Image: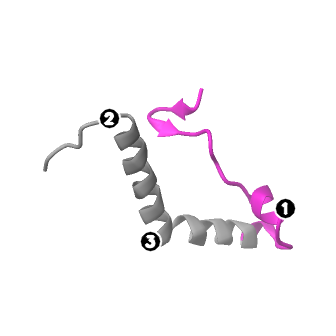
Amino acid sequence: MNYYKGYYTASLWSIPDVQGKYECTDEEAMQVLRVAMNNEATYSQIWESIDSAAEFENLKEIEE
C-alpha cells in the first residue's frame, strides 16, 4: 500500500539517505532534509508534477 490516511507514503526521505551521500550527524542530516523539503522550488516542482500527472490521467481541474 502506497498511502495511509490520505497521505502518499511510497517515497519518504530519511537521515540515512543524506548520510549515504554526506558525512554528517543525524541532526545535521535532519536539518538538510528540513531545508530541502521546505523550500519554494521543491513545492513548485511537486505541484508541476501533480498537474502533469493529472493532465495525463485526463482529470478536469476544479474551477475556483
Residue 25 shown in magenta: yes
Q: Magenta segment: does it hold 3?
A: yes
Label annotation for residue 20: 1
The residues tagged by marks 3 and 1 sit, at their Cα atoms, a distance apart of: 25 Å
Task: Please name the residue that numbered disc 2 is placed on.
Answer: 58
Secondary structure of residue under mark 2: loop
Residue lying at 71% horizontally and 55% vertically, measured from the top left: 14
Q: Residue at x 52, y 39 (%)?
A: 8
Number of callouts: 3
Within 10 Å of the Cα at label 2, are there few (<14), some (14-19), or many (20+) other Cα atoms? few
Q: CA distance from mark 1 to mark 2?
A: 39 Å
SS type, badge 1: loop
Q: Is residue 50 above or below residue 22?
A: above
Which amino acid type corresponds to the residue marked 1 in the rendered image?
Answer: Gly
Is residue 57 found left or right of 29 in the rendered image?
Answer: left
Q: Mark 3 packing: few (<14 Cα in 10 Å), some, or many (20+)?
A: few
Which circle, 2 or 3, is nearer the viewer? 2
Residue pointed to by mark 3: 40
Residue at 58 percent of width and 72 percent of height: 35
- 41 versus 10 height, above or below: below
Q: Report the mark closest to the observer, 1 or 2.
A: 2
Quarter of the rendering occupied by the N terminus? top right
The span shown in magenta is 1-27
Amino acid at pointer 3: Glu
For marks 1 and 2, the one nearer the N-term is 1
Q: Position of residue 20 (x, y in %)?
A: 84, 61
Q: CA distance from mark 2 to mark 3?
A: 27 Å
